[in-house]
Image: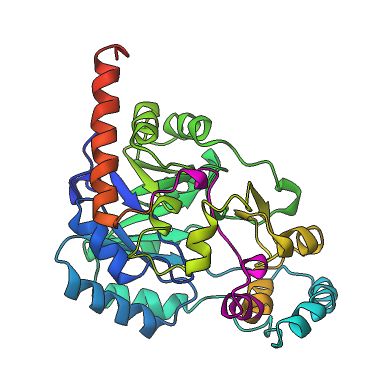
Amino acid sequence: MSSALTDLCRHPIVQAPMAGGASCPRLAAAVCEGGALGFLAAGYKTADGMYQEIKQLRGLTSRPFGVNLFMPQPDTADAAAIDVYRSQLAGEATWYETQLGDPDSGRDDGYDAKLAILLDDPVPVVSFTFGCPTRDVLDSFARVGTLTVVTVTTPEEAQTAQWAGADAVCVQGVEAGGHQGTHRDNPEADGAGIGLLSLITQIRETVQIPLVATGGLMRGAQIAAVLAAGADAAQLGTAFLVTPESGAHTLHKQAMTNPLFVRTELTRAFSGRPARGLVNRFMREHGPYAPAAYPQVHHLTSGLRKAAAKAGDAQGMALWAGQGHRLARELPAGQLVEVLAAELADAKDRLTRGGEA
């Protein structure tokens, strides 16, 4: 299905914005040059840091790209629970010879300053995670010619995004690696996420705007499946995380196919918000006790994660990964786009011929 979003690139493939360093300008440029839609992740960056990455990306490609923003979070965390978790992490700080971070380092991720930059110097696409912007914000982007996408995990969130004026929604299944983009962090709903194919169908029958499907997608045949289910494009993160252009730490890349890490789980251990990663020591020991406190827990553990990476200890890192991580292929990003597109074409051909070999 053609839409303003899919018309931006040759293939209905989007590289997921992976905050924390993986989605760097080099990766986004390679994806764009390959005929897909590359994304920068502005999360955890300063407004100027985001701007400098946009400038760098523009120097590497003239093709359309996107930038992802984190929505500001309400102050609903229990300070006492955060203090208890800080005490539980004291041994980690001693082990890695580092300090625990300040949980009150900020909740808005420089949102207003980033909006100002993106409205003053527009990019083709801006997406939002952890909530839905106001209609005024989305209308402002429409006036400068920027397409907007809101990450959703339920039909109700998709409806909210459509009512607010989003151009599309990114439908995130529970299979997805990294943070679940729920608009409201409700601990009672932990583990109740909806699988991608079921979620696409529910949302397709709820809203009329285009859908970008994401969650565990690693092969062209899976892209064909979500397109057949009603999506307009597919977004892949873990598949691009292991490419040489990705800015992810080497240990993180290696862990995707390391037999030592056999499964993923949703955890609050590293950030205080549900996020899917490879099960390691830190997740096993601290996940059951982590409070619902994002981004406070993220700030608290930031130094620990960096120290673990510096020490070469993957057991103390946040190894974000989708459920399809064992299918990761260490191909250059542009070549991966070509392979996925070829697999997609083959799957479509087989569907057209009624599944014949």
Depth order, front residue of 43/307: 307
The image quadrant where one finds the N terminus is top left
Asked whether 261 falls inside the magenta stretch, the response is no
* The quarter of the displayed image where residue 348 is located: top left
* The quarter of the displayed image where residue 87 is located: bottom right
Q: Report x, y in % for residue 124.
A: 23, 62
Q: Is residue 355 visible in the rendered structure shown here?
A: yes
Q: Report x, y in % for residue 343.
A: 28, 34
Residues shaded magenta:
304-329
Coloring applied to the structure: rainbow
114 over 207 or under it: above or below: below
Q: Report x, y in % for residue 95.
A: 76, 81
Depth order, front residue of 267/71: 267
In the image as oriented, which residue stretches furthest toward the front?
Answer: 259
Task: Please name the residue shown 78% across and 64% down the image.
Answer: 286
Task: Please name the residue shown 59% across and 81% down the image.
Answer: 106
Residue 241 relative to residue 210: left or right: right
Q: Report x, y in % for residue 157.
A: 52, 46
